[in-house]
Image (cartoon, rainbow, N blue to C red):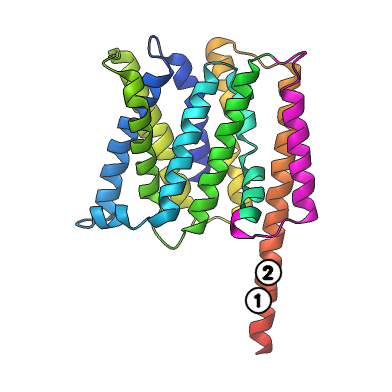
Amino acid sequence: MVATAGLLWSTLGLGVRLMDEAGTWRILFYRAIAQIAVLGVLIAARNPGAFARTLTGIGYNGLVSATALSFSSISFVYALSLTTVAEATLILGAAPVMAGALGWMLLREPITRTNWWTMGIAAAGLAVMTYTGTVSGNVVGIILALCGALGFAAFSVFQRRGRQSDMLPAVLLSGVVTLVVTGPLVGRATISGGDALVAFYLGGVALAGGLALYTAGSRHVRAGELVLIAMTEVVFAPLWVWWAFGETMAATTIVGGFMIMVAVLIQARAREAYTTLRRHRRAARVRTR
């Protein structure tokens, strides 16, 4: 489920490129409609007769995570209009490293020496990718992609903070937030039939379906493995647009993106080792008692 989620997310950039006429705001607006519709049906099917109670049960953490996810989606899609899919996606891959820093600030989760190293490596990778002398995209696009990564990191942290509740409705609420923000910007602008189909796929299948699978899979897969498996998004996203549109990557994108992925993989393995150590210590205390 987690691998499939990453694979679905990897097609988001391709879907945006396939749009014929729709601009950024219309893409976000109609994608949000599909996201709300699909998740609404899914949540209603999972909680028959308790749809409203499930939505209101997300609490403060759900509201913040929904806003953060909406901010991430808007920033990322806008970044795709200014820079390449490869650059935007690779920067988005730094979200787990940012989540570690936010977890320390908001949840008081400890930052180990390894965490500091990975954050430093990721920062260096971002510096390489945004080097103005050779970067292939627009620096504003890179900054927006960085905002997208930060938003997704905040979404992950507050999802974890409110994990006692069903947090899937927060993903639906993020679509509502996106709809409210982009609605006035879209106005009465319509969308073609082909673009509407692509928008439905982006919101109802790639985004909503991927997040639903990721949420369900996270109950059965360890945290460290989650990050590793979900990296299918970063691997495949540049390949789709290269295959369909011949969109290539600059040398700085490859080097900087490789550095970010190294940082993410190191942190994922370190987090898994830390979780295993805590489990063993807890078991040892129980045996002692």
In the foreground, 185 or 62 = 185
In the structure shown, which secondary structural element does the residue marked by tag 1 occupy?
A: helix
Task: Write the residue at 39% across / 40% down.
Answer: 174
Task: Write the residue at 34% across / 35% down.
Answer: 35
Extent of the magenta region: 106-135
The secondary structure that most of the magenta stretch takes on is: helix
Task: Write the residue at 55% across / 51% down.
Answer: 157
Residue located beneath label 2 in the image: 278
Q: Position of residue 166 (x, y in %)?
A: 38, 56
Task: Write the residue at 44% across / 63% down.
Answer: 164
In the structure shown, which secondary structural element does the residue marked by tag 2 occupy?
A: helix
Q: Amino acid at mark 2?
A: Arg
Assess whether residue 125 is covered by the magenta stretch.
yes
Q: Position of residue 13 (x, y in %)?
A: 51, 23
Picture quadrant where residue 183 is located: top left
Q: Amino acid at mark 1?
A: Arg
Q: Which circle marks residue 282 in the picture?
A: 1
Q: Position of residue 92 (x, y in %)?
A: 60, 33
Q: Which circle marks residue 254 in the picture?
A: none
Q: In the picture, which quadrant includes the C terminus?
A: bottom right
Picture quadrant where residue 94 is located: top right
| Marks 1 and 2, how far apart at CA | 6 Å
Left or right: 28 with respect to 246? left
Tag 2: Cα neighbours inside 10 Å, few (<14), some, or many (≥20)?
few
In the image, residue 61 sits, relative to residue 281, either above or below, namely above
In the foreground, 135 or 48 = 135
Evaluate if marks 1 and 2 touch, with contact meaning CB atoms under 8 Å apart.
Answer: yes
Left or right: 133 with respect to 56? right
